Amino acid sequence: MTERYAVIGNPIGHTKSPLIHGMFAKATNQSLHYSAIEGPLDGFVGAVQAFRDGGGRGMNVTAPFKLQAFELADERSERANLAGAVNALKFEGGRILADNFDGIGLVNDIQRNLGMSLAGKRVLLLGAGGAARGALLPLLEAAPAELVIANRSVDKAQTLARQLADRGPVRGGGYGEVGEATFDVVINATSASLKGELPPLSPVVFAADGLAYELVYGKGLTPFLRLAANAGVKRLADGVGMLVEQAAEAFVWWRGVRPDTRAVIDTLTIPLA
Ligand code: ATR
């Protein structure tokens, strides 16, 4: 029987998830149907229940419902708890299981697709909102030499660093406190690029042979990537690989089969220049 999955968000018109999971299903010979649901802004829980009652097996969750999905879950992974948000649900035996694959998707993209091992590297994470929180634990689990969180509201970065202090070498502060040292990997997890803005970042933070990673996907050379390029950084990436890798993690979780991601990333890639 064809099993049903869906992504829920609002708006949902631009989602790539049905395309990604459709390609995964075809490549792995899995019989499933994956649709997009525009959840009512005041009716997320009802929409999830209706999908589950109709035989749905799992869902991806996107803005603005990731926090409500967190609340709705019966069981959450540790990384979902640390992120405070959930992007995937699995319906199993009357229970709702929840996880957050955004961070592991980011780490897998950097290490597997972009070929940069994070072990022993200096990593700078910009932002302390939902996107940054999702990335923190998977980044620390990749054993960097140091993970620095920089945020405009300094207290948020410091709080996150304190929460994770026993999980690895992490510190948090403002953009001015980042220091003059360079970083091998600089990740923009702020929402600045969505507004065409640039975090107040000094270009000296970029190591020329390092990687500048923009979490936002499909916006070309954002002000952050342009700053990095002007600072001499050769390796620039946007979030297309992360998008596909987080989907692959959900697919494995639901179906027990790991899809190859390369062809899907190639299909979705929009050139940066
Ligand atoms: P998301 O879920 O996309 O992370 P969010 O939780 O609203 O969204 O967080 C947005 C993040 O982008 C925050 O870290 C925010 O910084 P503040 O906490 O100081 O507000 C950051 N941000 C947004 N616009 C920014 C800008 N122009 N410069 C620097 N940081 C910015």
Image: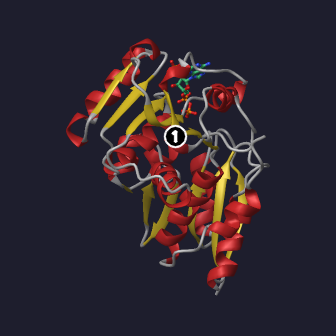
Classify 201 as above or below 121: above
Q: In this view, does 221 lie to the left or right of 73?
A: right
Q: Which amino acid does label 1 sit on?
A: Asp
Q: Nearer the viewer, residue 160 or 270?
A: 270
Q: Which of 39 and 185 is in front in this view?
A: 185
x and y percent of residue 225 in the render? 65, 32
Identify the element where label 1 is drawn.
strand
Image quadrant assignment for residue 136: top left
x and y percent of residue 135 in the render? 44, 43
Image quadrant, ligand 1: top right
- Residue at the image point whose x is 24% and y is 42% from the top: 167
Q: In this view, does 169 lie to the left or right of 4?
A: left
- Residue at the image point whose x is 50% and y is 64% from the top: 249
Q: Residue furthest top?
A: 176
Quarter of the image for the N terminus: give it.
bottom right
x and y percent of residue 272 in the render? 75, 43
Q: Is mark 1 within 8 Å of ligand 1?
A: no
Q: Is residue 205 left or right of residue 55?
A: left
Q: Can residue 35 be seen in this view?
A: no
Classify 157 as above or below 56: above
Q: Which residue lies furthest to the left in this view?
A: 166
x and y percent of residue 95 in the render? 41, 64
Classify 153 as above or below 255: above
Quarter of the image for the C terminus: give it.
top right
Which residue is the site of mark 1? 209
- Coloured how? secondary structure
Q: In this view, does 253 lie to the left or right of 36?
A: left
- Residue at the image point whose x is 44% and y is 61% from the top: 96
Q: Can residue 248 be seen in this view?
A: yes
